[in-house]
Amino acid sequence: MRKPCAPIQFAVLLAAALSLQALPAAAQANFPGKPVRIIVATAAGGPTDYNARLVAEVLQRVGYQVVVDNRGAAGGVLAVQAVTKSAPDGYTLLVSHASPIVIFQSLLPEKPPYDALKDLTPISHLSNVATIALVNPEVPVKTLQEFIAYAKARPGQLNYSSTGTGNMPHLTGERFKMRTGVDLVHVPYNSAPQALTAIITGEAAFGFQSPDSLEQYKAGKVRALATSAKKRLSNAPDVPTMDEAGLPGFTSGAWYGLYGPANMPKPLVDKIQADVAKGLAQPDVIERATKFGFELIASTPEQLAAHMRSEVKSWSGVIEAAKIQMK
Amino acid sequence: MLVNWKDTATGGIFIALGAWFLFAGYGLERGTLSRMGPGFFSPILAGILILLGAFIALRSIGVRPDSIGAVSWRAVLFTCAAPIIFGSTIVGLGLAPSLVLTVFCAALASRHMSVLRAAVVSLSLAAFCVVLFSYGLGLPVPLIGPWLGG
Amino acid sequence: MDILNNLGIGFSIALQPSKLLYCFVGTLVGTLIGVLPGIGPTATIAMLLPLTFALDPTSALIMMAGIYYGAQYGGSITAILINLPGESSSAVTALDGYQMARQGRAGPALATAALGSFFAGTVATLIVAVAAPPLSAVALKFGPPEYFSLMVLGLVASVIIASGAISKALGMVVLGILLGLVGTDRYTATPRFTMGFFELADGIEIISIAVGMFGLTEIMRNLEDEKTRDVMITRVTGLMPTREDIRAMTAPILRGTVIGSALGILPGGGAVLSSFAAYMVEKKVSKTPERFGKGAIEGVAAPESANNAAAQTSFIPMLTLGLPINAVSALMIGAMIMQGIVPGPNIVVEQPTLFWGVIVSMWVGNLMLVLLNLPLVGIWVKLLSVPYYVLFPAIVAFSTIGVFSVNSNAFDLYSISVFGLLGYLLIKLGCEPVPLLLGFVLGPMLEDQLRRSMILSRGSAAIFFDRPISLTFLVIALAVFCMGIIPSIRQKREEVFSEAD
């Protein structure tokens, strides 16, 4: 059962087909002279795809033609690889979540066939997504600190659910264990809904989930202890931030960025970055994104590059430590 | 001696595939019962496959052979080559020329097919597919690829 | 009279002209892509996702649901006509449906599929409307041990339905499971059996196996002796089922509907398992089990009803809990989120018009499917009179494009050829591909749930026997296995004795 290919609108495709034949190569001066292909490192429908659609929409508003091409295979490795191999002319861009960019190099036994720090041109950070710490409602705790105390009294007895080894909820969970010194058993599931279901049924006592899980909280199926967002979320104002819950600065790795192949000319990078930044600053775009817990961040290419480097370092530390604990 | 070679061959194939999975999975961590590793389940299955293969092969002895029927090697060759042609040319040549080649190759699998007929079939089918998939369903594959300057 | 009220709301939404239109478009597109080998509903819905942003959420969901169950139905058309299951759940339909087509009874086979699907869809929609919340509670009772035992039952069943030697069918299941393990191990991120190919990190593409082992293999078999096929199409007899056919299909449709509705609720594998389970039950209760695999109409009616019923009830966890259980419902949730609706357990209360409108539209869509497809039966059957030397290159073309559309990955195309060759070899040696396909689909889930259960129980296998639902499945699996293996041993003995005479 897998995985969708690129979605596209008929009109855009028609234009794409015609212009591909008509214009062999467009000069940088009249960029974008043909449709820009945004390769997405996941299948359609998830948060990474949502970021890509947002970029596509804001670029279309300023006259770009955009083709969105979802390639979820191998956790996004093949999508990144395809972008690193394409021409640095701005017509092939990548929207990716953090894993294939800053995590797989230290996590996977077989390294991805690229070095994201060298083989990609960072263009702009797009957004961060808050993570929510959830517990099963039968667990007799009301706050994050109470949970930490409860778990410390039961080392190795409680489970936490994730969407798979090396995915963000797992690494965030390991980061949580390192930070607080609790001993929780990791149970991987195949998808976010399954991991969430495990917290609802009590198979797992604890877990990190994206903000759409707050609907389950509102219905009383799970208890939300804290959110990693900087401010309390508007759709669940009673859930404290990590700062308030006593874990200042605790973040998840759910962030999304826009990249191109290595060696893109600087003026081209700047033009795309400026168009995206302008688009992401529009009030209606911000309003929609905030509703789902996306915090839009249009950074400079330099800021994104620095963020990538710091993330690589931070996660390789967690992975190192977690591997030791796994045995 | 009576031997049903068909079953002997089946057993042999199962044993070979089982052995390959044993070999390729060698070194995968077995883990513990409470945390099974990637190499816990597969050797058991590979072992079962080898045993089944041995059972089928042994049982073939003393049984009247039965025929495997006719085989058209021409069909096997051209049918299996077609997806490979498509896979190796789709990115470079683009959808339209790659389809023409693929269908032309596939068509030759039939004994009733002349080169002229195959050409007609491949050109018309390729045109039909381009309309259906590219324009109808919005398949995001260029019609003419970079090898042809697209 | 709450339910009548709610259905009233549903009908007032679903019968609006615009909703009827989107429902029709959805089922039509679904049927068409179901007929095209290789392209499945997930790929299609993903391709059409941007179009749905322009619609209101209810219309978007109605159309996507229509594509999903339309494709389930369309997939059985190719299964019957050319022995290429469009969906893994229609692999069983191909067993007897294709044989019926070879005997010139493609028309009745297609009509049976349409009628069975419609009946099952009607009943299952009613179940969704009446009992969705309690049923979703049942679904939550299924933890890893229950799934493990259910998968064991499913795999045992697949051995039984194969018509050849049981040892060969077992071997094919085991081989299928092993092939299903190829890829990255989810528990440790270790690559297994990938031979260093990153293209295999997500495992072998199932469509490559289906197209290779069913599609290409069938073409090679048909081309062995190109005269036999011409004989087959000259004897097309009757397009509609006879009175006898209708009598024969009634009970299987009822049983298939029950099985499908029950298994459809379970996340992962429910729809596939249901068609296999329904087929196995028919073969077991039949007085003439030897007709199965040779064109028995029950072998089409039961699995087709089951998989369509399952297609409807599989929406229950999504609609009542906001938890998607398959790729299609995950995409539908994605579409809702982009529309500004975050689905959760409160969706029935917060969005009653959306909830009931979608449910009622599923029934309307099933009605449209049957009205659309009964007249089309004649046209589909005419397809068989297209000269084979045009038909089979078309199958190759559609399949290759379809496979490429899934991941844009050339590797998946090379896999088609490998599995075409392997499938042809094995079929020539008397091994059926259907158990392999089921092993491939269910095997990884089997390992997954086994490992998860053992983590939860901290290493004690007692977890499978302590839990009543799990224990029940294991006992049934054992019984089914014995029922299947004893007659085959007896038969074998008789063969040996008769040969000795």
Image: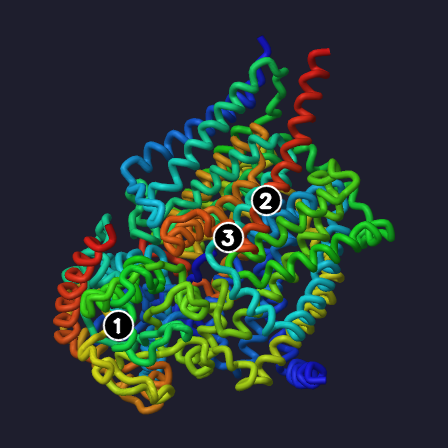
User: Residue at horizontal 50%, vertical 76%?
Assistant: C52
Residue under circle 1? A148
Circles 3 and 2: CB distance less than 8 Å?
Answer: no
Q: Residues within 10 Å of mark 1 (few under 14, many from 20)?
A: some
Q: What's the mark number on residue C335?
A: none
Q: Are marks 3 and 1 on the same chain?
A: no
Question: Marks 3/1: CA distance?
Answer: 31 Å
| Residue A231: percent from left, percent from top | 26, 87
Q: Residues within 10 Å of mark 2 (few under 14, many from 20)?
A: many
In this view, the residue farthest toward the front is A153
Labels in figure, total: 3
Q: Chain of mark 1?
A: A
Q: CA distance from mark 3 to mark 2?
A: 16 Å
Residue positioned most to the right: C243
Image quarter for residue A116?
bottom left
Single out the residue that lies furthest toward the bottom: A283
Which numbered disc, 3 or 2, marks the residue closer to the eye?
3
- Comparing C40 with C169, the one in front is C169
Marks 1 and 2 belong to one chain: no
**Identity, as a three-letter code, of the amino acid under mark 2:** Ala
Amino acid carrying mark 3 in the image: Asp
Q: Is residue C17 visible?
A: no
Determine the secondary structure under disc 3.
helix
Amino acid carrying label 1: it is: Ile
Depth check, front residue: C380 or C253? C253
Q: Earlier in the sequence, mark 3 or mark 2?
A: 3
The residue lying toward the viewer, choosing from A179 and C241, is A179
Relative to C349, A201 lies left or right = left
Whole-percent x, y for residue A297 in the image: 23, 81
- Chain identifier of the residue bearing label 2 in the image: C
| Residue under pointer 2 | C477
